[in-house]
Image (cartoon, grey):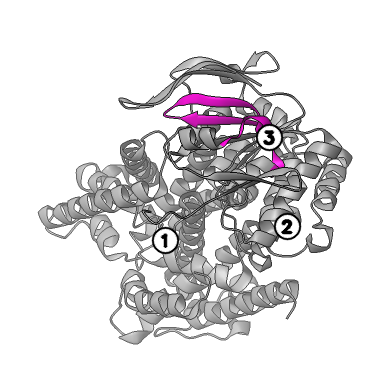
Amino acid sequence: MKRTNRIVLCFMITIALLFILFFTAVNTGGLKVGAGQLFKGLFIEYDKMVAAIYDLRLPRIFISMLAGAGIAVSGVLFQAILQNPLADPGIIGISGGAGFFTATAAVLVPSLYLLTPVFAFAGGCTAFLIVYSISWKDGLRPVRIILIGIAVNAVFQGLVEVLNSISGQNVSQVASIVEGNISVKTWSDVKMLAVFIVIGLFGAMLTAERCNLLSLEEKTIQSLGIRVNIVRLYISGIAVLLVCICTAVTGVIGFLGLIVPHIGRLLVGREHRVLIPYTVILGALVYLAADTVGRAAAYPYEIPAAVIMAVAGGPFFIFLLRRSKTV
Amino acid sequence: MKVSELSFAYDSKKILDQISFQIPEGRITAILGSNGSGKSTLFRLMTKNLKPDQGTIYLDEKDISKMKLREFSREVAIVHQQNRAADDMTVEKLVSYGRLPFARKFCGKSQEDQETIKWALGITNLRKHCSTQLGKLSGGQRQRAFIAMALAQNTKVLFLDEPTTFLDIRYQIEILELIRMLNRDYGITIIMVLHDINQAVSYSDEMIGLKDGKIEVQGETKRVITEDVINRLYGVRLKIKEVDGKKFVWNVRHKSM
């Protein structure tokens, strides 16, 4: 099949799957409505069941899709910067830093709940600065960033666990970061997330051509008059923004930023002007699928999406690696 | 290009020690020397990839350490030894990167950019492969694609670091003939690091021989290359024969070796 046709087909199938999953997610649980009833209840006349779904289920569905898109695209950006398939915002410590700062704020100054994104961004930036400054030795070497990131991530994750333990595991924001639980989210979380995600994704699209360029050797890029470390820094800034805001709302979600970009590359290739928009849709689909499965699998109990991602993501990632000729 | 009293050391290990020379314009200059002689470091210093500890490198009377990277890339193109790129990147896309030193923010490619890319693809015989993905090219075609990218920079000076490494003999000749043609037909000054002495003899006009961070020999390749010079540079005794009036270096196996 011609490459362009294949890409168009991938987009169409993924968008169709996202629509199907959206309606499945809306109807997963005690309340069930048809597509017509949902549309009527949302836009034409009041419907008690639709109103309940609107308040209880739709916020988490939209949060799943927005955070899925954001985390997956930040994975694409980090993998482009570091030219390493192991690069993931979770693995290199950014999510850990964001999670720790958010959890600390929730324990020490719970009244500042509305400033959660600011704390998350500060935490992500702190982790980013720690990892990059320790890694700097006559420039940035991707492997060093990943190895130091793994160590920094372990420290932050440990500190979040400490906070969770000393707070008696009863501060919901800390528990939500540890478990990756989005069951109590509201429309105000959706609005906050949407604003930052749209800004971040727009920024990511602007860097697409530079992400393509980063596939060349560092020396080659420099010989074209481009300062590679500056490019790496501003793409990192966008990736950090995306993952921090998502972590503030959803907690730390592993594997998403790792496997979605890989699947995206296998399906639509490495051209970032195509890969980034495709990853937006695929990331939304994968996270929403994980959250929906988590709600349905042990109903009436819930398994957090982060746990589903970890259980399903690991083996799926190994399967992809074994199947691929190029990765 | 002029190099004046250039010194460089990694930590306390001196790699280059007060070397000075001039690269003649419009000629092909080969840099030769054994492993550890300092030729790769010299290449990196001359291509602004390293900063000298002492000394100055001039390009048209300008100190290159004072030139901005972008300004330098408009004057000098470089083909590195290792060339990595995404396998599904097309040849045309790669070559178009050669116009980045001239790119203006939020502007597409100019008519001049498009014409230069077309010229670079044509001269390297890659026009019919412009939509081919790099992963589907042979080693020689791939190397030509990277040379085409450097040519799209449209500079008067081209640096090549061991351009025939990893290539079989057919592609080695193809690349060296292309380099010779670029110099002969377009007057591009070429400076290349080479390992193969016979390639230097056949395809360079001038040579600089390095040993232990100092210049051991410099001059017209055909004139200065002798059995004694090779022995001094590499510490090995090789024979030089004349084949069709051209020098040819070959190894005679001794029983003691």
Q: Between A45 and A297, which is closer to the camera in this rendering?
A: A297
Instruction: For residue B96, say whether it is visible.
Output: no
Q: Are marks 1 and 2 on the same chain?
A: no
Amino acid of disc 3: Lys
Which residue is the site of mark 1? A186
Q: Does A286 sit above or below residue A205?
A: below
Which quarter of the figure has residue B226?
top right
- Looking at the rendered structure, the kind of residue marked 2 is Val
Image quadrant in which you'd find residue A6: bottom right
Q: Tag 1, which secondary structure?
A: loop
Measuring from the top left, give residue A267's x and y in whole percent.
59, 73
Res B155 → quadrant: top right
Segment tinted magenta in the rendering: B202-226
Which chain is disc 2 placed on?
Answer: B
What is the spatial separation of the Cα atoms under label 2 and label 3, in whole angstroms? 37 Å
Secondary structure type for disc 3: helix
- Residue highlighted by disc 2: B91
The disc numbered 1 marks a residue on which chain?
Answer: A
Q: Which residue is mark 3?
A: B222
The three-letter amino acid code for the residue at tag 1 is Thr
- Residue at position x 57%, y 74% in the image: A46
Q: Residue at x 79, y 57 (%)?
A: B126
Horizontal side, residue A36 vs residue A192: left or right? right
